[in-house]
Amino acid sequence: MPAPTVPTTTGAAGQRPRQASLEELGRPLSDLTFVVVDLETTGTAAATSEITEIGAVRVRGGEVLAEMSTLVRPSGPIPALVSVLTGITDAMVVEAPPETEVMPTFLEFARGAVLVAHNAPFDLGFLRMALERCGYPPPSWEHLDTLRIARRVISRDEAPDCRLGSLARLFRSTTEPSHRALADARATVDVLHGLFERLGNLGVHTIEELHDFSARVSPAQRRKRHLADGLPTGPGVYVFRDVQDRALYVGTSRSVRQRVRTYFTASEPRTRMAEMVALAERVDAISCAHALEAEVRELRLIAEHKPPYNRRSRHPERAVYLRLTDEPFPRLSRVRDLRVDATSLGPFAGVRDAQDAADALLAAVPLRQCTGRLSPRVQRPACALADLGRCGAPCDGREDVATYARHVQAARSAITGDPTPVIDAATGRMDRLAAEGRYEEAAHERDRMVSFVRAAARGQRLAALTGITELVAAAPTADAGWDLAVIRRGRLVSAVTVDRGVDPRPWVDAAVASAETVVPRPGPAPCASVAETERLAHWLAGPGVRLVRLDGEWSWPALGAERAAQRYAALTRTATDALGAGRPAPVPVGPPPGQSRGRKPNHSDRQ
């Protein structure tokens, strides 16, 4: 076929036409070979985790040319949570080839093709790291990211998000994603072809046009680049404001100027953020000592200003709590605000989660469920729950204050200490329902128990930190300095960065002397928001963080809810995936690790 020609647009009439170059013509998507790849790994960080499975599909012109699938033997064991999620166990990979044998095969399979992956930076990062360990030079693959493309093409009305499972359902993929490499790669192929159809309607037919489409920045967006001028280059918080000086969006970064500049010079896949940039007229910034202080200030500013384009942490006052009332016969009360010190469970994101946790506790402990105050001197008829054995009926005098107090103490112990009674009661019901094949009901029992266990573990973590009068901690920086944080009652009250080679002790004294004074109030986070206290707890548990001073004790209950929360959280995700696929939900049966029914472990979970 003769090469097409493009007539000239300038010069004298009758000038001879010239042949268009390949760069001008572009490479049609229908003529290119793509290798769609998906990986399963031992973790999320390419530097510290390894590949356990590779699945790849080679396609061209809408047709599958070849497939590749293999397990990969990592150098260490596969974490239990990963095995639960993917179904890949140590026994399955014990005879699998190592990455030194698999990577040459994959390189040959992908030769001359454009790599495609869903969330490509994740998969390509693992592939590059594996090739580096095998002694290969860093590859310079041309690649496409179906996640990034979908964010520009798919509207929220069509799909709730751009996860692979959501897109596979949207495009009616013949393969359902299942956290196994080849199945996910096949689903990504269907998603890729569905996106190509959408792109064709938008006038995108070549891969060059697709690259430009993915990186498109509007002229109006570029004209606002000057808003980043003069912003600090270090860590801090930035606030986008509109023409009326209202806060539109609050963000944080380790380099404020560089991060803000990307809003005006890079493609923004989130429609709402592009809309925010269009409304912005000014950007304010607050410099911070280090990243932790910036994150805490971000949380505080979001709670204060409630910017319309921030989705998280805007309304901490909407959290729901379960509180044991202060009366002769206490009950569980659902409240929005804890105005007095009392045993409480929460916070919960919504009323449904709170009710699930309450149902799990009430199924194990026969607290009364009627509303209103009861008096030991005034009796009234009991409700049906008494006949069902789910309430001791203090209302008609069957239980006095002392007898009923035992139930209150059991509830208080389950909330603040050992959740085993709630877990045992729920597990017994799940066992019976699963034996009868009533899997959805068993899954509902599991979800109620998990709501309780998660809330109890969260409350215990918060109580451990908010009970400390003062704590000073130091985290190592990349340049061998120290990030110092002074924390009082779960609130960050001072932050300092100490450079390399400088004696940090005078800086610690100065940080403590200049720290904010706090006055505790009722609630699980008496001096800060729950989000702030949890962020501090996460930072304190980070690698290399050292406790410099501690006024008090930082510990979790030896028989607390933390281990159970971790175990059942992973099982809940797996069960949800199974129910979505129309399979019976795996029901977690038995006690959490380190515990057995009727026997308490002999160890301590001290931090």
Image (tube, helix red, strand yellow):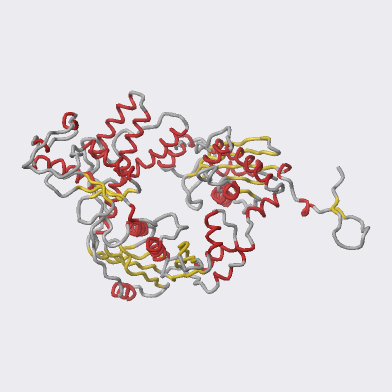
Can residue 134 be seen in this snapshot? no
Residue found farthest to the left: 377
Q: Is residue 514 left or right of residue 32?
A: left
- Measured from the top left, where is residue 401 in percent x and y? 9, 42
Residue found farthest to the right: 14
Residue found farthest to the top: 436
Kindly indicate the quadrant of the structure image that contains residue 462: bottom left
Kindly indicate the quadrant of the structure image that contains residue 602: top left
Q: Quadrant of the N terminus?
A: top right
Can residue 606 be seen in this snapshot? yes
Q: Is residue 32 left or right of residue 150?
A: right
- Measured from the top left, where is residue 326 in percent x and y? 16, 50
Position of 454 relative to 300 (above/below): above
- Measured from the top left, where is residue 534 in percent x and y? 34, 56
Q: Is residue 352 left or right of residue 106?
A: left
Q: Residue at x 68, y 45 (%)?
A: 201
Task: Compare residues 422 and 570 and report the one nearer the observer.
Answer: 422
Please count the marks in the image: 0
Task: Compare residues 37 and 294 and report the one nearer the observer.
Answer: 294
Task: Compare residues 16 and 386 and report the one nearer the observer.
Answer: 386
- Measured from the top left, where is residue 288 in percent x and y? 42, 70
